[in-house]
Image (cartoon, rainbow, N blue to C red):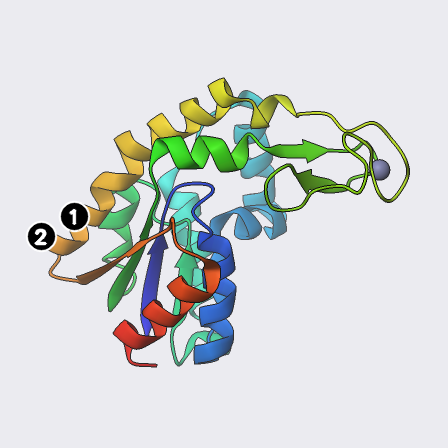
Amino acid sequence: MKIVLIGPQGSGKGTQGKILSERLGIPTISMGDLLRNAEGELKEEINKCMNEGVLVPLHITDKLIENRLSKSDCSEGFILDGYPRNLVQAKSLKDITKIDKVVEISLSDEEAVRRLSSRLSCKCGMIFNSITRVSKEEGICDECGGELFQRDDDKPEAIMKRLEVYRGETEPVIGYYGEESDVEVLSFDGGKSIEDIAGEIEERLGC
Ligand SMILES: [Zn+2]
């Protein structure tokens, strides 16, 4: 089964991808990983884009996806996590492979901000969450005793900015698959628990 997994940050998309990947015995593929692990000429071009703060162009992301999907572990299918991110990428992906199902995990902006802005970091690398993963002593790291702080990335303004990009650029991809591309879109409520969502996904995918 060839699956595209779509959802905003905070929806638990990554976790569901992992569960589904084990369930179906197919790999989860993230563009972030592909970009980080690229080698040779591609790597140089990617670094240049990153340094200039511009989007990595389509011919590179296409190449990375094409190479990855040609590996033997994808013969039974795969889960694309966080790709395609916009309509241009979705239309280009169509020429590389045929997608069977889109799994959308939706979440309101309010809940995404609530979940993400409750994240607390420590300089040692530990991450806590004032809702779901509370440190033993408030504001103090369990591992090293350091003082916990909120990263700029986890502040509501920064989260809202990323959500705007998601609503404006990524969400239209869902409509594209459902309407233009005739791919079945299965939508799930990301506000539910991880176990509930995983159960619903399995049921509706029949796996
Ligand atoms: Zn620490």
User: Which residue is at the far right?
Assistant: 144
Q: Residue 141: x percent and y percent?
A: 82, 37
Q: Residue 169: x and y, percent?
A: 29, 34
Q: Measured along the vertical axis of the image, is residue 73 above or below residue 47?
A: below
Q: Nearer the viewer, residue 102 or 198?
A: 198
Q: 178 left or right of 169?
A: left
Image location (x, y in percent) of residue 115: 51, 37
Amino acid type for the residue under numbered disc 2: Glu
Residue nearest the observer in this picture, 88 or 164: 164
Q: Is residue 148 left or right of residue 182?
A: right
The residue labelled by disc 1 is: 176
List the single residue furthest toward the top: 157
Ligand 1, seen in the image, is in the quarter at top right
Q: Quadrant of the N terminus?
A: bottom left
Q: Residue at x 81, y 36 (%)?
A: 137
Residue at 26%, 73% (x, y): give it.
204
The amino acid sitting under disc 1 is Tyr
Task: Please say if the residues under marks 1 and 2 sit with CB atoms less than 8 Å apart.
Answer: yes
- Left or right of residue 48: residue 161: left
User: Residue 53, position in %: x, y?
Assistant: 52, 23
Q: Relative to 128, say whether 70 is above or below.
A: below
Q: Is the residue 128 above or below the residue 24 in the image?
A: above
Q: Could you tell me if residue 113 is visible in this image?
A: yes
- Give the secondary structure at mark 2: helix
Viewer-nearest residue: 144 or 179: 144
> Please, what secondary structure does the residue beneath circle 1 have?
helix
Bin the neighbour count of mark 2 within 10 Å (Cα to Cα): few under 14, some 14-19, many 20 and up.
few
CA neighbours of label 1 inside 10 A, class few (<14), some (14 to 19), many (20+): some
Question: Which residue has dot 2 on it?
Answer: 179
